[in-house]
Amino acid sequence: EAQRGRLPAQSSLCLFSFPGGKCDPTDQDVVHTALRETREELGLTVPEEHVWGVLQPVHDRQKATVVPVLAGVGPLDPQSLRPNPKEVDQVFALPLAHLLQEENQGYTHFCHRGHFSYTLPVFLHGPHRVWGLTAVITEFTLQLLAPGAYQPSLLAQLPRGRV
């Protein structure tokens, strides 16, 4: 995860995300975009043969399409990375075992004009709270990597009368 600054109106919320960005004209496809962005933002070169696959596209609040690309990087020490200071403020790792512990999982319910609107996952790690689209992508990834160990409890978390 990489910290990318703070929301202007909510100074207590930090923006964390996976490396990524828009396709450059030189990128062959979304995989090459993801590998280039990872190298540019974190100084981490991931060989193309380490790519496991592409998740289903998701859309952000501005309706932009985000295509998550999963790759194996092996044991990773965040201190060994060379983050681009123009794009990344902080880097931290979230181990799979940590993400699978129920006490580090939750959901945030969003309301609009006093009515329940939608629910998104949230993952906790010390002072870090991974939420929004990054948490959605994390949840999709956990469902693929640990289908028996990760059981989203969204239905149990929804406000009564909302499914």
Image (tube, rainbow, N blue to C red):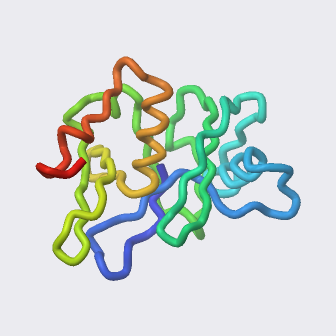
* Residue found 23% across the figure and 40% down from its top: 155
In the rendered structure, the answer to whether residue 122 lies left or right of residue 162 reads right
Horizontally, is 27 left or right of 156 in the view?
right
Q: Which residue is most to the left?
A: 160
- In the image, residue 141 sits, relative to residue 21, either above or below, namely above
| Image-based side of 113 in relation to 45, left or right | left
Q: Where is residue 19 in the image (x, y as percent from the top left)?
A: 59, 53
In the depicted structure, whether residue 95 falls above or below residue 86: above
Instruction: Farthest residue to the top: give it.
Output: 148
Q: Where is residue 109 in the image (x, y as percent from the top left)?
A: 23, 57
Note whether 24 is above or below 79 in the view shown. Answer: below
Residue 43 in percent (x, y) is at 66, 50
Q: Which picture quadrant has residue 116?
A: bottom left
Q: Position of residue 142 (x, y in %)?
A: 43, 32
In percent of the image, x 31 and y 67: which residue is there?
Answer: 13
Q: Residue furthest bottom?
A: 9
Give me the residue at 59% from left, 70% from top: 86
Dividing the picture into quadrants, the one containing residue 45 is top right
Which one is nearer the viewer's eye here, 90 or 114? 114
Q: How many labels does the image show?
A: 0
62 shown above or below 153: below
